[in-house]
Amino acid sequence: MPALIDSHNHFDDASFDLDRDDAFRRARASGVSAQIVAAVSARLWPKLKTVAARYPGTYAAYGLHPAYLAEHRPEHLDRLSDWLARERPVAVGECGLDYYLPDLDPDVQADYFTGQLRLARRHNLPAIIHARHAVDQVIKFLRRFPGVRGVVHSFSGSEEQALRLLDLGILLSFGGPLTYPRATRLRGLIRELPLDGFMLETDAPDQPPSDHRGARNEPAFLPEILSCVAELRQTDPTEIAAATTANARRLFGLPDEPPASPH
């Protein structure tokens, strides 16, 4: 089985502080060779940097998540530019729009989202995009930044929206929600997408697969997402693993060989 890449999680989250070493070992034992860890606020960038440095194959992405709008300040965009230039992460993000949570001003969200798309273009980095109840709006803003590449993580939109994003050069990623039988539209979509158009993710510690409902999610559960996708597409899991890993390596500029685990 090819090595798997968890294309989106929050392994720096406090829920892993007591057992992060064990969780990392479990992920490696399950075949997860690399993880893309997306930031949520400027306050947590230093911790994410420390986590990524400690665990081989763990790659940082720095950004300003729309759900943490109350923490963000305009000067954080300038600080982010400095971090991108100095640290050379694999992506900008997590950025985007969230029209589901109340009290998140859409105009202020748009300012931070477009600011980060501008930085992604300036620093030649992909963008990791959050688009909850806001896929059409995300597409609208992406069209203002032609050539910016990236991924809409935990995609939950329609097939038509998916194809529009793929046409813009934006990949999609899928995780735990796909494993729930009631997610009929999502499960139908994954059957139709081209293999070079999507990646696998956990979004740990959030969005656990159906077999872990109510529990903390973790990168070691990624093979369950793989099995679900392979079953839905009636395809050999090895083929799905090889394609999605290649997609992640290509988008994020990752090495072909996974780094060795620490002894």
Image (tube, helix red, strand yellow):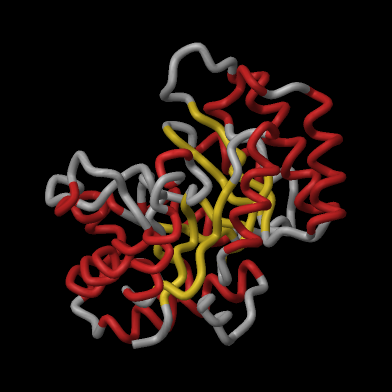
Residue at the spot x=77%, y=36% of the render? 115
Q: Is residue 123 left or right of residue 208?
A: right
Which of these two is toward me, 71 or 151? 71
Q: Looking at the picture, how far across and down is residue 33, in whole percent?
A: 47, 75
In which quadrant will I find the N terminus? bottom left
Residue at the spot x=67%, y=32% of the render? 43
Which of these two is toward me, 35 or 134? 35
Marks counted in the figure total 0
Residue at the spot x=68%, y=47% of the render? 62
User: Vertically, is 36 above or below 238?
Assistant: above
Q: Looking at the picture, how far across and down is residue 127, in whole percent?
A: 65, 52
Looking at the rendering, which quadrant does residue 170 occupy?
A: bottom right
Which of these two is toward me, 69 or 54? 54
Q: Looking at the picture, how far across and down is residue 217, in whole percent?
A: 31, 49
Q: In this view, does 141 lie to the left or right of 189?
A: right
Looking at the rendering, which quadrant does residue 114 occupy?
A: top right
Residue at the spot x=65%, y=19% of the render? 107
